[in-house]
Image: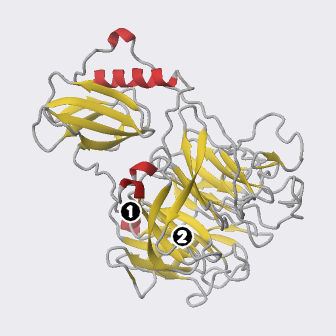
């Protein structure tokens, strides 16, 4: 089996805060406009000067998940449109079937959105080896206008041509109301010739900041001797393996511009454009099998789960401001361990180390990358959630919490479901995210939606009463705080998502609607609390600050 797993490492990411005002500029009492922000960032900077302080968010012990539907080998869920409140879900099954499910009616539509399985067009290489099949689907950014979507799978082209085990990135059209795929309207954008079955990668995401399509690819399959300690013959494809070979698209993260039913183009800013010894499509390299990875929808950071060979599973992170071209290590390293060679594998310290890695203990076998949670469960907000395909014993899920010094702390997470998971049969394949940031879990038998933290009593705090506009807001923009009428305010407090109070001030004269400016802020999400005169409890709102 060649899936992913983890270990215990820490990776420090530098955090810079720009102090733009002197101490003399900070008022003792809150007044409108950018003075609030100056005080805010002085406070944040002072906190950053004390790295020994534990400002970290506490991870929840458990999250309750609701079982939505039964499905055969679901590997992804995608909303059926880009609407934030879209309730129709596309359930992507490894067999090639894409189901249409409505969350409100709790019904599966009889007619699927697409069927490439044996019962349909019979195109997908599924059932011979567990890693082959339909790997992902994503809607075109202009889906509401053009009805186009992209899939990546192992199998034949719709006309029956091609090699069965090869992986294909295809674009399909849909019917007039964009509710059913049109199998006669297709275009093959990319063919990834596979030397063996397995290690396909196969996750698709459009960059939330640049709009390019990113594609993960595996190293081409094949497993070595299985001996522990490195050097066991993994990625035996050429002298350095496909992961390190910049003249193949395998073992990479690719970045392209798609144009529907037409050839793709290469973004000019791709890191290897113009390099005669590298392919232009490559964004990052050094991967074994990045089966599931994701963007942080708020910051644009990438989190990449890369399946290990024998000893280690790993989670990697790439900052949103990365220029690309990073080497994530395989097959020079597996997790934090030298693999091939087994000593002195990173002499120049140029390889990107994982933010978390774990060994093949406790039944773990294959890391399943997840998402940094940006949904309504407050205790989970900002935490990275992931799992392992196996992990049949006590720990099946984890969270990673970013600390103020750039390190990440791990904690086990229990996901509680009605009746529990089916022992030894409910392999976990993927997490998925809807357009509102809610998280879904796909197992071999079911699709679940993460619902609430039982420690909160089954309810999540509402952040709808305090209106902040625009939201998200860019740096340097005015933000209007509105409570639905004219009210006098006596206090405002701002809290970051680690739970740290970064501003708390009494007000002398302030009324709503109230305007303040985001100059000097850095990207992130903050809870804003405002007290009306005479009120004991605040009205809350949540705002995202973006680049």
Q: Earlier in the sequence, mark 1 or mark 2?
A: 1
Kindly indicate the quadrant of the structure image that contains residue 438.
Answer: bottom left
Q: Is residue 518 left or right of residue 320?
A: left
Q: Which residue is nearer to you in this view: 36 or 196? A: 36
Q: Position of residue 75 (x, y in %)?
A: 57, 71
Q: Mark 1 highlights which residue?
A: 82
Quadrant occupied by the N terminus: bottom right
Q: Which residue is nearer to you in this view: 370 or 332? A: 370
- Residue drawn at x 63%, y 34% is 12
Does 156 sit above or below residue 512? below
Q: Position of residue 238 (x, y in %)?
A: 88, 58
Kindly indicate the quadrant of the structure image that contains residue 405.
Answer: top right
Does 21 sit above or below residue 472? above
User: Dot 2: few (<14), some (14–19), or many (≥20) neighbours within 10 Å?
Assistant: many
Q: Position of residue 540 (x, y in %)?
A: 27, 42
In what element is the residue under mark 2?
A: strand
User: Dot 1: few (<14), some (14–19), or many (≥20) neighbours within 10 Å?
Assistant: some
Answer yes or no: is residue 411 visible: yes
Q: Is residue 520 left or right of residue 311?
A: left
Q: CA distance from mark 1 to mark 2?
A: 21 Å
Q: Mark 2 highlights which residue?
A: 442
């Amino acid at each position: 089996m060649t899936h992913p797993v983890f270990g215990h490492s820490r990776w420090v990411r530098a955090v810079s805060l720009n102090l733009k005002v002197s101490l003399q500029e900070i008022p003792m009492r809150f007044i409108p406009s950018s003075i609030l922000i100056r005080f805010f960032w002085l406070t944040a900077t002072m906190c950053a000067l004390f790295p020994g302080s534990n400002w970290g968010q506490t991870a929840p012990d458990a999250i309750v998940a609701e079982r939505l539907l039964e499905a055969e080998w679901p590997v992804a869920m995608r909303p059926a449109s880009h609407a934030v409140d879209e309730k129709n879900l596309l359930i992507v099954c490894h067999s090639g079937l894409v189901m249409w499910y409505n969350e409100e009616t709790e019904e599966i539509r009889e007619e699927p959105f697409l069927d490439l399985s044996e019962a349909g067009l019979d195109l997908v290489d599924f059932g011979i080896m567990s890693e082959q099949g339909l790997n992902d689907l994503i809607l075109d950014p202009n889906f509401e206008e053009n009805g186009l979507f992209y899939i990546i799978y192992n199998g034949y082209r719709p006309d029956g041509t091609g090699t069965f085990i090869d992986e294909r990135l295809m674009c399909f059209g849909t019917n007039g109301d964009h509710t059913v795929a049109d199998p006669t309207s297709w275009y093959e954008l990319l063919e990834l010739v596979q030397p063996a079955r397995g290690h396909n990668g196969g996750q698709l995401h459009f960059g939330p900041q640049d709009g390019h399509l990113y594609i993960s690819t595996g190293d081409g399959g094949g497993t070595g001797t299985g001996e522990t300690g490195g050097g066991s013959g993994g990625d035996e494809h050429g002298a350095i393996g496909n992961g390190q070979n910049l003249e193949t698209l395998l073992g990479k993260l690719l970045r392209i511009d798609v144009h529907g039913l037409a050839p793709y183009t290469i973004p000019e800013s791709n890191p290897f454009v113009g390099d005669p010894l590298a392919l232009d499509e490559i964004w990052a390299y050094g991967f074994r099998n990045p089966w599931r990875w994701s963007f942080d929808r708020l910051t644009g950071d990438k989190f990449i789960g890369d399946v290990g060979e024998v000893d280690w599973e790993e989670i990697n992170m790439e900052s949103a401001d990365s220029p690309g071209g990073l080497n994530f290590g395989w097959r020079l390293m597996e997790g934090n361990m030298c693999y091939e060679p087994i000593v002195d594998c990173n002499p120049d310290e140029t390889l990107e180390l994982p933010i978390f890695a774990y060994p093949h203990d406790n039944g773990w076998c294959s890391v399943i990358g997840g998402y940094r949670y940006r949904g309504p469960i407050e205790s989970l907000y900002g935490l990275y959630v992931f799992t392992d395909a196996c992990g049949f014993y006590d720990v099946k899920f984890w969270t990673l919490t970013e600390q103020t010094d750039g390190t990440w702390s791990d904690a086990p997470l229990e996901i509680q479901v009605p009746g529990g998971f089916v022992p030894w049969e409910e392999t976990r394949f993927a997490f998925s995210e809807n357009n509102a940031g809610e998280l879904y879990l796909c197992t071999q038998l079911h699709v679940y939606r993460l619902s609430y933290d039982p420690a909160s009593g089954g309810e999540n705090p509402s952040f709808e009463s305090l209106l902040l506009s625009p939201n998200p807001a860019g740096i340097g923009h005015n933000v209007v705080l509105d409570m639905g009428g004219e009210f006098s305010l006596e206090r405002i407090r701002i809290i970051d998502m680690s739970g740290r109070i970064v501003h708390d001030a009494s007000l002398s004269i302030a009324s709503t609607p109230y305007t303040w400016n985001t100059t000097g802020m850095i990207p992130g999400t903050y809870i804003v609390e405002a007290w009306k005169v005479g009120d004991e409890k605040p009205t809350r709102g949540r705002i995202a600050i973006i680049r």
